[in-house]
């Protein structure tokens, strides 16, 4: 069966987060999807089958199924644009209905998704202290203008904002301890943030819950983060830009557009680059 390998949120012809995309008339069985995702080895593989109104999509990491994955959705949008032409595609996920729009321009591809609705809440002090110990940070390393919080735009994330670029760059943690921490809190990722300006952010996303040390681009967390900024009345001016993956050698560019309507969907967009296709 054909797996398309696509780097989502690429910076031109470099970087981005690789995702597998599997398009078929019917989903493989759950054990087969788990096996395919593990064999592909990327942080996420999207499986799409036709539905009455568009596509039914499920996402699998090498170790687990997740309810929503932004970068794999952007990759799917690029694949559908290449396969069927530019346009808006309706996606039915396990827990939400969203859309992805694929674009084609001079042989290049990009995509934009509309996230599920967003929500956030402050992180409790015990969770924050455990997270800081996990990553080797201390209370004084936090940027309390963006307080620690749980944020969701289809999947749960813990947001930790740091006040130092050097501390942000030095992130390290034990994968097994991170997996336990994220599973206990039902988190998909922890999102570490450094604010360069009010509208430009650097982020890192440990994804130990899926068996991945760090993701170079995370659209779902970016949507959740944008929604959280709205909740705390951050001066987002309708758009934020996120640089992710730079400190792991895979620079990715993510754009998030949002309104002031509380909890409303966030539009997340970026370029894609096709890697290679192989038969699995």
Image: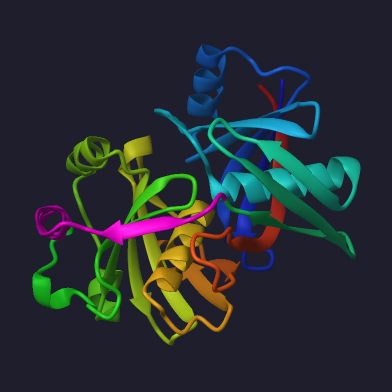
Taking the image as drawn, is residue 14 in sight?
Answer: no
Q: In which quarter of the image is the C terminus?
A: top right
Q: Which residue is drawn at 73% across and 48% down?
A: 77
Q: Which residue is drawn at 58% across and 39% down?
A: 96
Task: Give the image location of residue 93, x and y in percent.
Answer: 60, 34
Q: Name which quarter of the figure residue 83 lies in.
A: top right
In the rendered image, residue 259 lying in the magenta stretch gets the answer no
**Residue 59 located left or right of residue 181:** right
**Residue 37 located left or right of residue 87:** left
Total number of numbered discs in the rendering = 0
Q: In this view, does 229 lie above or below 32?
A: below
Q: Name which quarter of the figure residue 3 lies in.
A: top right
Task: Give the image location of residue 219, x and y in percent.
Answer: 53, 55
Q: In which quarter of the image is the N terminus?
A: top right
Task: Give the image location of residue 159, x and y in percent.
Answer: 31, 61
Taking the image as drawn, is residue 106 in sight?
Answer: yes
Q: Residue furthest bottom?
A: 197
Task: Give the image location of residue 40, x and y in percent.
Answer: 55, 31
What span is colored magenta in the figure? 116-134
Q: Which residue is drawn at 80% across and 26% down?
A: 52
Depth check, front residue: 130 or 118 = 118
């Amino acid at each position: 069966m054909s797996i398309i390998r696509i780097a989502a949120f690429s910076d031109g012809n470099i970087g981005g987060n690789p995702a597998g995309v599997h398009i078929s008339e019917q989903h493989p069985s759950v054990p087969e999807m788990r096996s395919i995702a593990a064999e592909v080895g990327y942080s996420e593989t999207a499986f799409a089958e036709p539905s009455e109104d568009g596509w039914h999509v499920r996402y699998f990491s090498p170790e687990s199924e997740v309810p929503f994955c932004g970068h794999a959705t952007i990759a799917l949008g690029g694949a559908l644009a290449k396969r069927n032409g530019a346009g808006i595609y309706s996606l039915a996920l396990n827990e939400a209905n969203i859309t992805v729009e694929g674009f084609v321009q001079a042989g290049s591809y990009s995509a934009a998704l509309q996230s599920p609705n967003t929500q956030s809440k402050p992180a409790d002090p015990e969770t924050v202290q455990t997270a800081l110990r996990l990553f080797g940070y201390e209370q004084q390393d936090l940027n309390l203008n963006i307080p620690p919080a749980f944020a969701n735009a289809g999947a749960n994330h813990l947001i930790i904002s740091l006040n130092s670029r050097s501390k942000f760059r030095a992130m390290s943690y034990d994968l097994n301890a991170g997996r336990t921490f994220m599973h206990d809190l039902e988190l998909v990722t922890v999102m570490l943030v450094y604010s360069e300006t009010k509208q430009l952010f650097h982020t890192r996303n440990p994804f130990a819950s899926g068996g991945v040390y760090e993701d170079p681009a995370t659209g779902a967390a970016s949507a959740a983060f944008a929604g959280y900024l709205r909740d705390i009345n951050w001066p987002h001016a309708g758009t934020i830009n996120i640089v992710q993956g730079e400190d792991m050698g895979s620079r990715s560019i993510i754009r998030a557009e949002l309104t002031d309507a509380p909890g409303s969907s966030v539009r997340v967009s970026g370029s894609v680059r096709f890697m290679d296709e192989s038969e699995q």
